[in-house]
Amino acid sequence: MSLTGAMLDGLFGGSKLDSLSKKDCYIQLIDSYRLRVDDDYKYAGEHHGLYDSKDPKPDFAHFLDLAEKRKGLLPQWWTPETRAACEAKAANNSSRNWADLYCAVEEHDVIDHYKDPTKPTKLRLLAEKVYGKPVQGRP
């Protein structure tokens, strides 16, 4: 196991997501995806999701497809029904929904929202585990 993998297991192993409520688990997955989309745009010049000027739902669905293939990453209670609930949460673009797939998020937004300067790192590690690679070009 790589050092990143070991760190991630400590921060976001399957048991960590298992310990969250369903709603909080959905939000972690959504925010991990949203921050990764911003990082890919900012550091690698990759346009996907919201930054591709298309509906971001298919790209988020791909993110969840990858997450489902990562053994032990998602909670044991994850099912097609809970996935649909996660996708519905992500697509809810009401002003009261922080985890809005249609709203870009940057590192400072994450820190401000969670009041935790380590939260962006945790979300990035989760996304790295899902995608199987870090953001290219990120310092």
Image (tube, grey):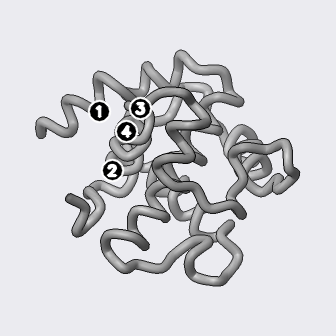
Left or right for 10, reference 62: left
> Disc 1 residue type?
Leu
At mark 2, the secondary structure is helix
> In terms of sequence position, does the residue under pointer 1 or pointer 3 come before the other?
1
> In terms of sequence position, does the residue under pointer 4 or pointer 1 come before the other?
1
> Disc 2 residue type?
Glu
* Nearest the eye: 84 or 125: 125
> Disc 3 residue type?
Pro
- Where is mark 3, residue-wise? 117
Q: Is residue 120 above or below residue 92?
A: above
- Residue 30 at x, y = what percent? 60, 47
- Where is mark 1, residue-wise? 8
For the N terminus, the quadrant is top left
Mark sitting on residue 128: 2
* Nearest the eye: 11 or 13: 11
Discs 1, 3 touching: Cβ within 8 Å: no
Discs 1, 2 touching: Cβ within 8 Å: yes
How far, Cα to Cα, is label 2 from label 4?
14 Å
Discs 4, 3 touching: Cβ within 8 Å: no
Q: Going 37% across and 39% down the picture, which residue do you hit?
A: 71
Q: Going 44% across and 34% down the picture, which residue do you hit?
A: 119
Q: Is residue 12 above or below residue 69?
A: above
How far, Cα to Cα, is label 1 from label 2?
9 Å
How far, Cα to Cα, is label 4 from label 3?
28 Å
- Residue 76 at x, y = what percent? 54, 26
Q: Dot 2: within a 10 Å radius of its alpha carbon, few (fewer than 14), some, or many (20 or more) residues? A: some
Left or right for 120, reference 133: right
Mark sitting on residue 71: 4
How far, Cα to Cα, is label 4 from label 1?
14 Å
Q: In the image, which is nearer the foreground, mark 2 or mark 4?
A: 2
Q: Going 47% across and 79% down the picture, which residue do you hit?
A: 47
> Disc 4 residue type?
Lys
